[in-house]
Amino acid sequence: GAVVSQHPSRVICKSGTSVKIECRSLDFQATTMFWYRQFPKQSLMLMATSNEGSKATYEQGVEKDKFLINHASLTLSTLTVTSAHPEDSSFYICSARDTDRYTEAFFGQGTRLTVV
Amino acid sequence: GNSVTQMEGPVTLSEEAFLTINCTYTATGYPSLFWYVQYPGEGLQLLLKATKADDKGSNKGFEATYRKETTSFHLEKGSVQVSDSAVYFCALGGGAAGNKLTFGGGTRVLVKP
């Protein structure tokens, strides 16, 4: 299957700072990328869907000004958590899909964000 | 809206034991159902899927049958190995959900030698 690389795998930041998480499709073109968030012992919750070259579509309750998503190329999407607070500490996972080639989405390894 | 409920873990088993992880769902339309597995330090991988009622997905000795009458998609394996230790996620997508996946909370499975 196709490979999605997510970086960093772990990050610790101070309250009030911003953190950028990258999601790259290594051997295919990701026409659509998805960002999920997972709290301890809870489900993965879809935050937003982005299509290359378009603005992201955010799920209800997700602050688009706080979670900035950029999908400027067919192989890279970034999620920036702005002005991070401890309650933003979570596990963030991206997935990518090439709608022309695959019927499934491929997932990155996830990023554990801790805001102190 | 769509939702997926799966049994909480951790599930601890001995090698060669029988594994069942229950998964039930609520959905509009006719979704596809998936099981994903996440091994330590890795991303989620698709384990198996079923796209319509009564379909059986299978892979690596795991099986799950799409039961519309009971809205279930239980995962089973007859004889687990230590290498099956991972977190398993049940999910639904497609149908009215389109590209979006709705996940269950995940079940951690630990297989001891």
Image: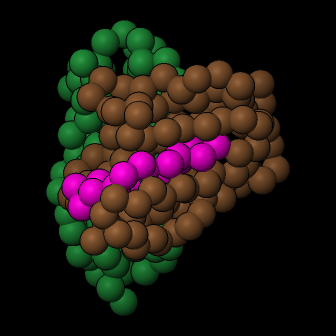
Q: Colour of chain B?
A: green
Using the rendered image of the protein, determine whether residue B65 is visible from the camera's viewpoint: no
Q: Nearer the viewer, residue B81 or B33?
A: B33
Residue B86 position in % (x across, y down): 40, 68
Residue farthest to the front?
A16
Using the rendered image of the protein, determine whether residue A45 is visible from the camera's viewpoint: yes
Q: Which segment did they paint magenta?
A: A77-96
* Residue at 77% across, 36% down: A74
Q: Nearer the viewer, residue B65 or A63?
A: A63
Q: Is residue B106 left or right of residue A65?
A: left
Q: Nearer the viewer, residue A37 or B107?
A: A37
* Residue at 64% across, 30% down: A32
Q: Is residue A36 left or right of residue A115?
A: right
Q: Quadrant of residue B12?
A: bottom left
* Residue at 43% across, 80% down: B82
Q: Colour of chain A?
A: brown
Q: Is residue A90 magenta?
A: yes
Q: Decide whether the magenta segment is chiefly helix, strand or loop.
A: strand
Residue B50 position in % (x across, y down): 48, 31
* Picture mark count: 0
Whether A26 is drawn above or below B84: the answer is above
Residue B90 position in % (x across, y down): 36, 44
Residue A49 position in % (x across, y down): 51, 29
Whether B75 is drawn above or below A91: the answer is above
* Residue at 40% across, 73% down: A12
Q: Quadrant of residue A16?
A: bottom left
